[in-house]
Image (tube, rainbow, N blue to C red):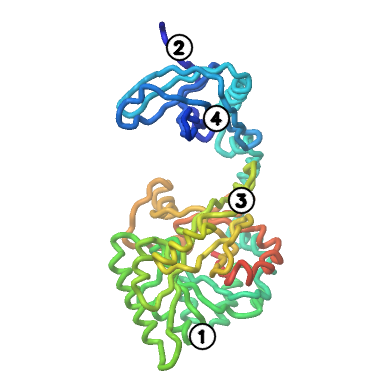
Amino acid sequence: MKKRRIKGIQMIPYGLLAGVMTEDSIEERQREVRLTEISSEGFRIRLCRRGKAEENIYPKAFKICFYQMDQAEYREIEIRHFQTEAGEQTEFYQAYDIFTVQEDYKEAFQKLCVEYSRYISLKLEEDDAHLAQEMTGYPAQEEEEHFKNETERNKAWFQNTKIFQNLPAELAVELDHPKLYEQYLTRPIERFMKEYWQQHGIKDARILGRQPDRLYIGNQFCPHLFPKEEQFFALLEKADKERMEVTVAFSFIREDRLAQTEQLLTRLDEWCKQQETSGAEKKRLEVVVNDWGLAHLVKRTEHLIPCLGTLLNKRKKDPRMFYKMGDKTLLEQNNLNAGFYRTYLEESFGISCYEWESCGYTQEIPQKIQNHLHVPFYQTNTSSYCTLCAVLEHGERGKQRERQECPAPCLEHSFFYPKHLYMKGKYNSLFALDKHLLDEPEQLKRELGIKWNRLVVNLL
């Protein structure tokens, strides 16, 4: 007797269609299956071969999950009435055709066909902005509205600066590129901060009501923007004389700079030791690590305190997430909400303080630990090679290459994005402004001292 075969739509993306098989056994073990073809009659699954060929399977039920685009959630159909036919067999997998006549399955399949067909048509006929508009209500008509220049952008972004006034927490400011290093070295801290605010369109130089308690020196994203060694120690000496604490920020470490970085950490450790006076408390410096190799190196030192950096403290963050439908509460947590992971970081690397970013939505932050909040920008992605350099030199983002040295064009140039996204391309990264934070400063102040031990300001 000739076997029946499923003839339908092949290889629908996993995010739109997923399946789980419950095996008919004492434990009723559930097994995830890959659906490779689907029709109104049933679906085809593919299972990995486990050593010897699997001639037979004994499913008790299937759960097919259909993603519903209009509701941004899955509809789960449990299938208990079905027939199974063995299909293609290779060295690596075994296929099976599952036939069913359940009405709820057929209804879900028909809706999937309509939505998937609409998605493919939009993908072929429209650009990404119009596709997003059709699927989520994204305002594609605003894509062409840009700021004319940096001055106009800063004026629009930083007109509400109440967030920076009367802060009940430690205040830090980031020095993350050569221009700021030079300005700080050649000016008293009072004059430096006054010019810093004015350069970003904030005319009231007394906006903070006080000078920073701490400086972050270095760049978390681009390794080329870390200060030269002589300049770096000059910055440390000046901050020490002005009685300001320092946190040293490193980006990811390239293989060819590993030995150089290790030497710098050794010298930094020795510098801390030299600052100690008889009877005084041990001099220690925080080091932001964005590379697991660097975390190992910092652990070997005596005077350096590692902090988990932005590139390692990961979470989903993008200004366009606002337009996505569905429940976003699961975004509030990341891996640091797991106590065992924090224990692992402390036992393995000595990490017990963490760098966070205000990223446009509520974050559930672990309590009773050192949490440092960076405002008002958050990083969305970082390239190991610089897209800005590629565009300036070749006119194409894709023509990126590794550099031994970089002329730092990011000090004069940046990428502009549509106004409504509040995004900025700077260094080798993309950043977005947390406008919600600037519009509602009182919410942050209620959290300072409870969620956050420190506020770190960087106006890019």
Q: Is 3 in front, or is 26?
A: 26
Q: State if disc 3 and disc 4 touch (CB < 8 Å).
A: no
**Foreground tag (2 vs 3):** 2
- Does residue 415 appear in the picture of this structure? no
Q: What is the CA distance from the residue labelled 2 to the residue labelled 3?
A: 52 Å
Q: State if disc 2 and disc 4 touch (CB < 8 Å).
A: no
Residue 93, position as x, y percentages in the image: 36, 27
Q: State if disc 1 and disc 3 touch (CB < 8 Å).
A: no
Q: Secondary structure at mark 4?
A: strand
**Foreground tag (4 vs 2):** 4
Quick one: label 2 or label 1, which is nearer the N terminus?
2
Q: What is the CA distance from the residue labelled 4 to the residue labelled 2?
A: 22 Å
Residue 283, position as x, y percentages in the image: 43, 83
Residue at the disc numbered 3: 421
Quick one: label 4 or label 2, which is nearer the N terminus?
2
Q: Which mark is residue 4?
A: 2
Tell me the residue at 50%/68% (across/down): 353
In the image, what residue type sits under mark 3? Leu
Quick one: label 4 or label 3, which is nearer the N terminus?
4
Q: Which mark is residue 243?
A: 1
Quick one: label 2 or label 3, which is nearer the N terminus?
2
Which quadrant would the N terminus be assigned to in this image?
top left
Mark 4 residue crowding within 10 angstroms, few (<14) / some (14–19) / many (20+): some
In the image, what residue type sits under mark 4? Lys
In the image, what residue type sits under mark 1? Arg
Residue at the disc numbered 4: 63
Which quadrant would the C terminus be assigned to in this image?
bottom right
